[in-house]
Image (cartoon, grey):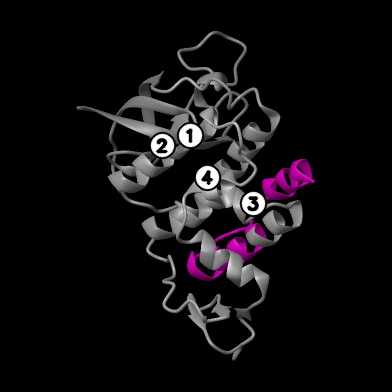
Amino acid sequence: MASVTEAIILNSIKYSETSVIMKCYSQNYGILSFIIKGVRSRKRTKFSLGSIEPLSIVEIEFNRLKKGELSHLKNIKSVVIYDDLRFNIIKSNIALFLAEFLSTVLRFQEENPSLYQYIKDSLVTLDKVSKYENFHINFLINLLKFLGIKPEVNNENFKFFDIENGIFKTINDSRYCVGGELVIEFKKLLGINFDQYFEILKTTNQRRNMTNFLMNYYKYHISGFKRPNSLEILNGLFS
C-alpha cells in the first residue's frame, strides 16, 4: 500500500551513473531515503534533478519497505514554489548551508510535526524576507528548542556560558566557557523576534562570531555533527 507525506528534501547523492539516493525529512515519517533511478540520464524520465533540489518542499508517494531498506518513489510534486530563494545568490547560499546543516543534525530524526512545520515555515519566510543577513543565525537559535538543547537564561547577571553543559555561569571555570560581548549578544538573541536581530548583530564580524559559536555548541550536543563546508562560502558573501 502506498504512503503519502509532505517532505523537505535535504540532499541527493550520486549512486550510479544515472541514479541518486535522495534524503528528505518528512512530516509523517521523519527521515526517509529513496533511490531514484535514471534521474541523471539524458533520457526523459518520470523524475528530474530539478524536482529534487535541496530544501524543495514536496509531496511524495512511495511504497514503504522494511526499516533500513531504500524505498522507490512512485510520485513527487511540489507543494511550495519559491519566488526568490532560487534566484537570489545570498538566499540560495543560505539555503545551501541550511540543507547541509540539517542533513547532519537530522540524520536519525523521527517524525516530529512541530519541527517539520518550523523548518517549512522558516523556508517560506526566507523566500519572502527582504533583510536576511541574520536569517541563518535566527534559524539555528530557534532550532535549539525543537532539539531540546536550548539553554535557559537563568540570570541576567551571569557573564559566562558553558558550551559543554549548555548553561550560563557567574565564573569562567572550564575551558568550555566563553564570555564577553558574544555571551551578552547570545543572551539577548534567545528572547527576541527575528526583526530585532538587526539591532544586535550589525556587523559581519558579529555574525561570523555568533555563527562559529553556534557551530561549536551544536558540535557538543549533537552526536556526529560536522561543520558545514558551505558556511565558509556564506561567510564570504557577507564580507
Query: Residue at coordinates 60% horizontally, 24% vertically from top-left?
Result: 86
- The answer to which of marks 4 and 2 sits earlier in the sequence is 2
Q: Which residue is mark 4?
A: 195
Give the SS element for disc 4: helix
Q: What secondary structure prevails in the magenta region?
A: helix
Task: Identify the residue under disc 3.
Answer: 228
> Between tags 3 and 1, which lies in front?
1
189 shown above or below 86? below
The residue identified by callout 1 is 125
Q: In the image, which residues are magenta?
A: 211-239
Would you call the spot at circle 4 few (<14 residues within 10 Å), some (14-19), or many (20 or more)? few
Residue 179 spot, x, y in % from top left? 64, 78
Does the residue at mark 2 contact the one at mark 1 (Cβ under 8 Å)?
yes
Answer with the quarter of the image where residue 213 lies.
Answer: bottom right
The disc, 4 or 1, on the residue closer to the chain's N-terminal end is 1
Q: Residues within 10 Å of mark 3 (few under 14, many from 20)?
A: some
**In the rendering, at what x and y percent does residue 226 appear?**
60, 58
Is the residue marked by circle 2 packed among few (<14), some (14-19), or many (20+) residues within 10 Å? Answer: few
Q: Amino acid at mark 2?
A: Asp
Q: Left or right of 27: which side holds 230?
A: right
